[in-house]
Image (tube, coloured by chain):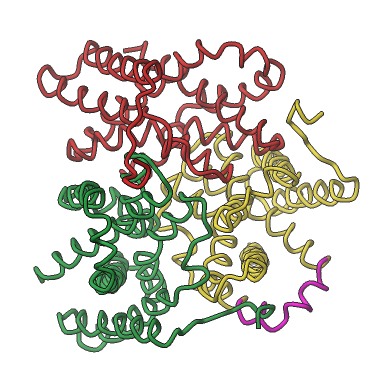
Chain colours: A red, B green, C yellow
Amino acid sequence: MEALYYIDLIGTFVFAISGVLAAIENKFDLFGATILGLVTAVGGGTLRDVLIGATPVGWMEDINYLILILLTLPICYFFQSHIKGLRKTFFLFDTLGIGLFTILGVEKTLNLGLSPAIAIMMGVVSAVFGGIIRDVLSNRIPLVFRKEVYAFACLAGAIVYYILISFNGTSEINVVVSILVVIIIRILSVKNKWNIPYNPLAS
Amino acid sequence: MEALYYIDLIGTFVFAISGVLAAIENKFDLFGATILGLVTAVGGGTLRDVLIGATPVGWMEDINYLILILLTLPICYFFQSHIKGLRKTFFLFDTLGIGLFTILGVEKTLNLGLSPAIAIMMGVVSAVFGGIIRDVLSNRIPLVFRKEVYAFACLAGAIVYYILISFNGTSEINVVVSILVVIIIRILSVKNKWNIPYNPLAS
Amino acid sequence: MEALYYIDLIGTFVFAISGVLAAIENKFDLFGATILGLVTAVGGGTLRDVLIGATPVGWMEDINYLILILLTLPICYFFQSHIKGLRKTFFLFDTLGIGLFTILGVEKTLNLGLSPAIAIMMGVVSAVFGGIIRDVLSNRIPLVFRKEVYAFACLAGAIVYYILISFNGTSEINVVVSILVVIIIRILSVKNKWNIPYNPLAS
């Protein structure tokens, strides 16, 4: 599935841009922006690979990821205001990215012989920990801990993907359906301002 | 030693509860509470496994750990006020947990052929880094860096354990004695408000 | 190259001192100071080893590193004010340290068969991530993200080193020249207050 590879690259690119924009907001210098773009883009997959023992981590073996991430630096620098105008386009690609990262995380973990529950969990980790590490390095409480329902969109996508491959093996349609689940839940949750609070004190 | 396995599960459970309670205090949503419970419970052992190269990390290969950790979410949600009333019980199980985590960390590291000093250090890492990662994700300076003497209780327990197994090999009595050392030092330190300051400026 | 080993030890020692001094400033207790000294000294190399799959991480297999790091605790405690007077000496050893850490990082990564770009990147990671982890644990935005040009000195050193070994293989002169590049760029940048800003909003 050649297409998956390109979606993965696009997802990486969009994630890197979100990291670099956060760096600009924090007034980081060029080095800080590079690191923040990098960890946002590949931090989730890196943590997954380290935990499941699949090192050297994936992006080290295909230089295209690093090239794309570095490319976001001049792009964000010169077109910062344009990018903010493209908010909707980015939201779409970002959601496509987290959907694919989730599925690839499930796939890679299952291939190592780990259990379905761990694979589903590693799918979510792949999709959300890049943003969590970005926030920790920016000295903030991770956004996804408080306001974002998208971790649950990933969880739903990962579970749907596992159920689908249990029935009809690895096939492209499973990937497409599962990513659609992630996209639809996320769009609905943003439109309807869904939230999954937990704090009994806050209610 | 079947009993050790159950103590390990209980320790994991108690650690997870402390993470989830911290999440509630920080007004995290359900996802944030899940992650905070998880990293508090297994973060120390995970870091140890990653550093010594024992991946995939331990809890991935026994689903009971994940199940117990997820169980703490409804429990903390519904019984939050009761839990706070059980402070002393929790303190005991928590201390039992860090004692056992320390011993298991020493054991696992020695089994990989690393030196005694590294094994003792990895025992302490197993016991205290879950809490450190919890505090970093909550955007706080780790509590154990400032106020807690319990890292030294772990260190003492790890050293005692290593000395005991050097003399009479692996046996249950070594585990019991070493955990008792951790428990006694911790209880004494809390009762007597022991502290190990370091800052020459503060004196 | 016996000399390299001793420079590595000296670099580790100087990095550990910088961590312990940061701990004193933050009023950490003895345990916090130990951890901060340790992560500052070996955090960069540890992250590199974990990412490239070279575990157990390097310092676990040579106890001298751990001994030297622990030695910094009494030294900083008793001679804190003297150390601050030695600022220039420390700056030199610190720069020597980051230069060597960079070269050793490039070398180790290439030896595992990874690509030159990744090796250069891992050289920089080895040199700067100890300080980044120190700052994260102290609940600060990493200094190197905002004010320090030294990441670029490391980058330049790593690139020069790779070019040199491509031409004339592994030889001592390559190491010396590359470390000199790091030292010269860093000294010049401090003298001339060079800075590599990135933020378009800040200009």
Q: In this view, does C131 lie above or below C67?
A: above
Q: Looking at the image, which residue is at 43% across and 33% down?
A: A147
Q: Does the magenta stretch include residue C149?
A: no
Which residue appears farthest toward the right when viewing the image? C192
Residue B131 falls in image quadrant: bottom left
Q: On the rendered image, what quadrant is the C terminus of chain B found in?
A: bottom right
Q: Give the range drawn in magenta.
A: C73-87
Q: Which residue corresponds to the image point at 42% horizontal and 78% vertical from the top-left?
A: B152
Residue A121: x and y, percent?
27, 37
Q: In the figure, A35 relative to A97: above or below?
A: below
Q: Residue at x 42, y 74 (%)?
A: B151
- Residue at 40% across, 75% down: B150
> Which quadrant of the view contains residue B117?
bottom left
Considering the whole magenta stretch, tell me its main secondary structure.
Answer: helix
**Viewed as shown, does residue B106 lie left or right of C70?**
left
Does the stretch in magenta take in C77? yes
Give x and y (percent) for residue C9.
62, 68
**Nearest to the observer: residue C65 or residue B164:** B164
Residue B37 pos. (x, y %): 31, 51
**Quarter of the figure with residue A125:** top left
Q: In which quarter of the image is the N terminus of chain B?
A: bottom left
Residue C161 drawn above or below residue B84: above
- Could you say which is closer to the camera, residue A142 or residue A2? A142
Residue B155 percent coordinates (x, y): 39, 78
Task: Give B89 or A13, whichever is nearer the viewer.
Answer: B89
